[in-house]
Amino acid sequence: MVKENEKLPLSKFTEQAYLDYSMYVILDRALPNIGDGLKPVQRRIIYAMSELGLNSSAKFKKSVRTSGDVVGKFHPHGDAAVYEAMVLLSQSFSLRYPLIDGQGNWGTVDDPKSFGAQRYTECRLDGYAQTLLQELGQGTADWQGNFDGTLLEPSVLPARLPNVILNGATGIAVGMATDIPPHNLQEVVKACIKLLKEPKTSIEELFKIIPGPDFPTEAEIITPKEEILEAYKTGKGSIRMRATYVVEDGEIVINALPHQTPSTKILEQIASQIEAKKLPMIVDLRDESDEENPTRLVLVPRSNRVDKEAVMNHLFATTDLQKNFRVNMNMIGLNGKPQVLDIKSILKEWLKFRTKTVTRRLQHRLDWVLDRLHILEGLMIVYLNIEEVIKIIRKEDEPKKVLQKKYKLSSVQVDSILEIRLRQLAKLEEEKIRAEQKDLDGEKAELEKILNSKARLKTLVKKELTEDAEKYGDERKSLLVEREEAAAFDETELISSDPVTIILSERGWVRVAKGHDIDPEGMSYREGDSFLSSAKGRNNLNAVFIGSQGKAFTLPCHGLPSARGQGEPLTGRLNIESGETFAGVMSGKDDQNLVLASDAGYGFIAKSGDLQTKNKSGKAALRVPENGKALSPQPVITTEDNIAAISSDGRMLVFPVSELPELARGKGNKIINIPKKRYQAGEEALKAIAILGEGRELKLVSGKRHFTIKSKDLENFKGSRGLRGNLLPKGFRKVDSVEVVSKPSKENKPEEE
């Protein structure tokens, strides 16, 4: 019978299993260690390569040899994943200070994952990797068993430099992630030395030494100083990078891209904007990148008058020519736990690690020196009693015990004596031992001085940091520059300002025709439909539609259907209430004055800009009485214009437009006196309004007849706003429509346009 060892609820088991998995991913896969700045797979790659003797001066070996050793000995995962990690450690455009020197196809800036197969490429360690491995065999590392317990591997490499912040790291664990940006070696070393001298140095003072990250690209860092400082204080934030460019022979040449930004993606983004006519000022786009110029993208402007700075600002705002990089300085600290640290804590904790490593190295060396001196002491006894020692070795059955007892030697000393070769018994060898003793005595004294003095230990750490900075340091690549915030072009700026005519039908169908010399009434309409209103505008302006209940609706002219067809219904583009129709359409700049009026005889002057809205349901503009309706809006050309108001009773009143108030919305003032009882009974209403001025006459249409009132005849209808007006000539008192016509003169031609 099988005995049950343990029973657990499923919820508890799954919770524990998930936590175990989470900790494995966090500690053994995704996050770097603060000591050497490496994730486990990276550490195993570097260590395996060092075991293969692949230092910076060695011959290159096939990459598959290294990945095979890593997978077979230390990292039992897929060789493809290990090889990809190797590739990233070798790419100078991915890592600020590469750890592997690759030969063959190791990817490009354009496509970092376009590297060749591991059976074709070759590799060895880069010189910088020696800062991680140089002290490995000197008692500086803790060792742990590999996955099957047959080999040992270092838990953390004894890094001589704070690689965790020099090369940075990115990784996604379970419930947490890391994004540590790379930094400049010389700046970081100076900050470390500053902290060694003055441990109470503030983050603000460190910020003067390390002004920001340093990516492996010459693109600019444009994040404000305050934001970078805040990221350094909290360990979290973002860094904004922007491409750099120059102007050569009138062409824009982009010569550096933000970190991890492929030029192919930039080309696609710009090309798509050119195709969508969002960049009409750019006529050509070329990629002239080569070995000498890894990044060289050329934009050809339409003319020399194009504002190149404005074009680039637009591209910075709309493409990956400007990118944000997250900062989340999460790493495994000396306590073995993941934590987000500020920049001072990172450097202080690493210096603590480094000081401990140097102490272990010195102590290891001191232990060796003491052991060697102990052995040399025994050897000197041999040379002082050489004849007797030889006699004992030759005659005694157990010479080791006899020598130990007679000369009071340790087991180690006797073993060394017994291993001496005959040729080492020469007198010259005795002199060598004495010289070695003298050297080791001096080294012992020096080591003990350093180990017994914190000041001397700090001085040694500073000296070694300075030496490494001189050997591997370089100038900053990513310059920190203050730039204004990039802004994309306003859509209207990119649209041509060609003249257009907006045509609205009785049933609310709209279309737009190119030019102003259009006969809207003569165009074809759907069966049962006819012309209602038209407006002259520009392609880059908006069209304002006035609903019968006084609401204003807005649509861009360039987005309206072409007049080649019969248009589209506005109900498909706007949210129209049941029973509402359209009164008319207008178009113009935001400061264009319009007269809005209801058939009750009230109205006001409104500006086109006040009527425009992005709301598809429209915007309240004119207050219309119950059962009333709005009239078609009329444009005001000058403040000296007159308004002609015609009632359904055949009366017309002409008065200055200036007598009407300017409002954003409302009912307005009385335009013409229509008795309230007659209006409510449906016996009389305001039929139409027209704006008249110099060079413009009024044409009345009644049935099939039309009649033009000359300017001099208008005097008979002039009066103050709000009067009843005078009767029109017999036969034209039932007006079907009115039209403003221009006198055939030169002055009127610009108005027709």
Image (cartoon, rainbow, N blue to C red):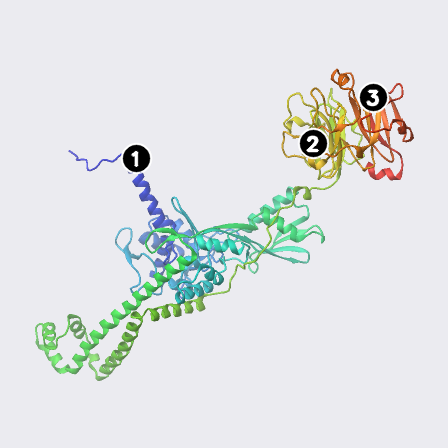
Foreground residue, 203 or 556?
203
Q: How many marks?
A: 3
Question: Which callout, 1 or 3, points at the residue further toward the start of the chain?
Answer: 1
Q: Nearer the viewer, mark 2 or mark 1?
A: 2
Could you tell me the amino acid type at mark 1? Ser
Q: Which mark is residue 11?
A: 1
Could you tell me the amino acid type at mark 3? Val
Classed neighbour count for the residue bearing mark 1: other residues with Cα under 10 Å, few (<14), some (14–19), many (≥20): few
Q: Please determine whether, in this image, residue 213 is positioned above or below residue 443.
A: above
In the figure, residue 368 lies in which quadrant? bottom left
Query: What residue did someone put label 3 on?
Result: 735
Residue 651 in view of the camera: yes
Q: Please determine whether, in this image, residue 489 is positioned above or below residue 255.
A: above
Numbered disc 2: secondary structure: loop
Q: CA distance from mark 2 to mark 1?
A: 64 Å
| Residue shown at the point (65%, 53%) measured from the top left | 309
Numbered disc 3: secondary structure: loop
Residue 295 position, x and y percent, is 57, 56
Q: Nearer the viewer, mark 2 or mark 3?
A: 2
Could you tell me the amino acid type at mark 2? Arg
Classed neighbour count for the residue bearing mark 2: other residues with Cα under 10 Å, few (<14), some (14–19), many (≥20): many
Query: What residue did someone put label 2 on?
Result: 665
Q: Nearer the viewer, mark 1 or mark 3?
A: 3
Q: CA distance from mark 2 to mark 3?
A: 28 Å
Numbered disc 1: secondary structure: helix
| Residue shown at the point (76%, 30%) measured from the top left | 534
| Residue shown at the point (45%, 55%) measured from the top left | 233
